């Protein structure tokens, strides 16, 4: 069984913990406590008919935890990069998250999937990030990551409704297996 270490990255309160909990089959709640440092979960799954196990590292998004996060990046094989569609700042900060991961994981560029979370709140913020903006960003990032051997797809998600949550994790797993296989 292949062990796949992944990180959930993004600013504080974008819904990383809620997405992880939804993926693990737990019910949505709006009352999450801020992650301090990192939280960890494991889930067995099948990717391309191969048994695998995700080690899911949910990293604190607040700037004061940046020095601690570096420890948790080591050995990461990929990441879900999450922003809140109603918070433009969380979208703008994505590049910082990518750079932090690739600098600290010991591997350089690794597969990413960008998630615009809280799609159930669309229409509640005049400054929200449009689907088109996020798709354009993922296409531009894919041009950068293709030489490393992977595209960077984008999905809108909602931990509340479950929209695209399982699919996002599956797509990341498939991308990682393909990327690792190409390097061997």
Image (tube, grey):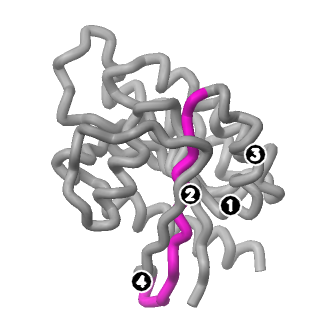
Confirm or deny contact between disc 2 and disc 1 (CB under 8 A): yes
The dot on residue 46 is: 4
Q: Is residue 86 magenta?
A: no
Considering only order in the chain, which callout, 3 or 4, is on the residue closer to the N terminus? 4
| Residue 10 screen position, x and y as percent | 52, 36
State the CA–CA distance, disc 2 to disc 1.
9 Å
- Residue 57 x/y as whole percent: 56, 57
Mark 3 neighbour class, 10 Å CA radius: few under 14, some 14 to 19, many 20 or more: some
Question: Was residue 59 drawn as part of the magenta stretch in this picture?
Answer: yes
Quarter of the figure with residue 125: top left
In the image, which residues are magenta? 48-62
Q: Which residue is mark 2?
A: 57
Marker disc for residue 70: 3
- The percent coordinates of residue 113 (x first, y second) are 49, 50
Q: Which numbered disc flags the more N-terminal residue, 2 or 1? A: 2
The residue lying toward the viewer, choosing from 22 and 90, is 22
Circle 1 packing at 10 Å, graded few (<14), some (14-19), many (20+), is many
């Amino acid at each position: 069984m292949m062990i796949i270490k992944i990180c959930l990255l993004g600013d504080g309160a974008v819904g990383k913990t809620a997405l992880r909990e939804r993926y693990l089959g737990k019910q949505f709640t709006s009352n999450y406590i801020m992650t301090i440092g990192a939280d960890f979960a494991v889930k067995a799954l099948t990717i391309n008919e191969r048994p695998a196990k995700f080690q899911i590292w949910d990293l604190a998004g607040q700037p004061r935890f940046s020095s601690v996060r570096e420890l948790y990046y080591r050995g990461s094989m990929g990441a879900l990069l999450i922003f809140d569609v109603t918070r433009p700042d969380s979208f703008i900060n994505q590049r910082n998250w990518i750079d932090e991961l690739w600098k600290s994981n010991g591997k350089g560029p690794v597969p990413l999937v960008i998630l615009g979370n809280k799609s159930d709140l669309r229409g509640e913020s005049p400054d929200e990030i449009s689907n088109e903006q996020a798709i354009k960003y993922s296409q531009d990032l894919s041009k950068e990551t293709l030489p490393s051997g992977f595209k960077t797809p984008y999905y809108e998600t909602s931990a509340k409704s479950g929209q695209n949550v399982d699919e996002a994790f599956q797509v990341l797993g498939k991308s990682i297996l393909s990327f690792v296989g190409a390097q061997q």
